[in-house]
Image: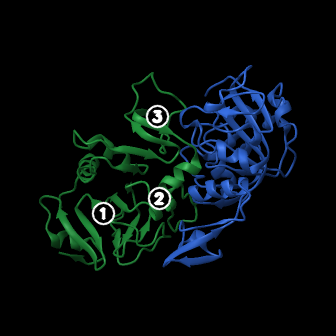
Amino acid sequence: MKSLIDSQLAARVAQDIPDGSYVNLGIGKPTHVSGHVPEGREVIYHSENGILGVGPTPEKGTEDLELIDASKRYITTAPGAAFFEHSDSFAMMRGGHIDIAVLGAYQVAENGDLANWATLDEKFPPAVGGAMDLVVGVPTVLVMMKHVDRDGSPKLLKECTYPLTGLGVVSRVYTDLAVLDVTPDGFRLVELTEGNSLEEVQSVTEAKILT
Amino acid sequence: MDKSVADLASAVAPITDGASLMIGGFGSSGIPFGLIDALLETGVSGLTVISNNAGAEETGIAKLLKAGMVAKVICSYPRSPGSVWFERRYEAGEIELEVVPQGTLAERIRAAGAGLGGFLTPTAYGTLLAEGKETRIIDGRGYVMEAPLHADFALLRAERGDKWGNLSFHATARNFNPVMATAARHAIVEVRHLSDTPLDPETVVTPGIFVQSVVEYGVRP
């Protein structure tokens, strides 16, 4: 099957970020989305640690060590940026003021349940961060992830087996193999990565893909 | 009124064994490194640390964990890159961990500072982190009852302060520092610049009423 690489996937998600949006990008793959938003669109990025208006990565040697994003990477400010403290930051998230969140995931279920904070492996201490607050408050939650796990097991499921981050919160899933909407009836195909057939993608998806 | 303290050691001197301690910062930003180093020298133990992260490498909170001074950590994200001392103590069963969603952590602290008995949040409803907690359905949506979170002390970092305890911050080093100042009985702040003159009231982010002592520590990480 044809599989998008991470930068292609980020570019695909970026196409769906409208001009004028306030967007929170989760740690990992989603941070790359901002580099691919088409010219001419002004998007304001929120980072949970207290900034609206995250700008590009600073040039080497010009970093401000106290100006970082939620992934703990050095950032700059974009025009119109603002700093604020944590209560305000989470009021923006929980209070429905952010338009779009882009998150990674371990698993997504056909009813929109999201699992992205803990596995069943007790060796690892749980770490939830701001994901649970984000998904209850942001109206459009986009997930970008690999279609199947490293061991080949499906990640698009009838029901999640890992602990949930939020219930029925995912709007759309972008994987290396396909784009799928979460609808009241389940996953509905938006598009296949060029060169893939529905049968092929369905064969590595536990949940039924509607067309 | 003069809340300024001569040095870091005097600033942390009131902290005793078993104290609960809010520590400001997120990742590497806004952490009171000077106060943590001074606390390390006191050798107090059995601390409860309330902070977003649980330290990384050999800096900040990781030093307190390494020294065995911490009994319990309340945080949202203990497993950061390089958080080896947290992982070591956790795996050995030497510390208790309470994981709290980050916005719920901030709001529990805010509720304590604002004198509230708790609040209802949709965050974590229906998940593992809501187990055993009171829930309510309001207008068809599920909410979880969360309790206020107080502390005996807060160790904080700000960019500027004056002797009245007024504070202003730099960039994303603000994070949890202002809200933690409100919820601790005794908030201790290291400031990069201790101003001889009062801060411009228009630029004050944390009013001095929430701060008990201010000490200058000019080192920026």
Can residue A150 be seen here? The reply is: no
Q: Upstream in the sequence, badge 1 or badge 2?
A: 2
- The hue of chain A in the figure is green
User: Residue B11 lies in what quarter of the image?
Assistant: top right
* Residue type, numbered disc 3: Tyr
Identify the residue shown where x is 59% and y is 38%: B174
Identify the residue shown where x is 28% and y is 60%: A174
Q: Tell me the chain of label 3.
A: A
Q: Which residue lies under the disc numbered 1? A: A173
Pointer 1 with pointer 2, Cβ within 8 A: no
Residue B123 position, x and y percent, is: 54, 65
Q: Tell me the chain of label 1.
A: A
Q: Which residue lies under the disc numbered 3? A: A74
Residue B178, relative to residue B200: is it above or below? below
B25 to the left or right of B22: left
Residue B31 position, x and y percent, is: 65, 37
Q: Upstream in the sequence, badge 3 or badge 1?
A: 3
Total numbered circles: 3
Q: Which residue lies under the disc numbered 2? A: A134
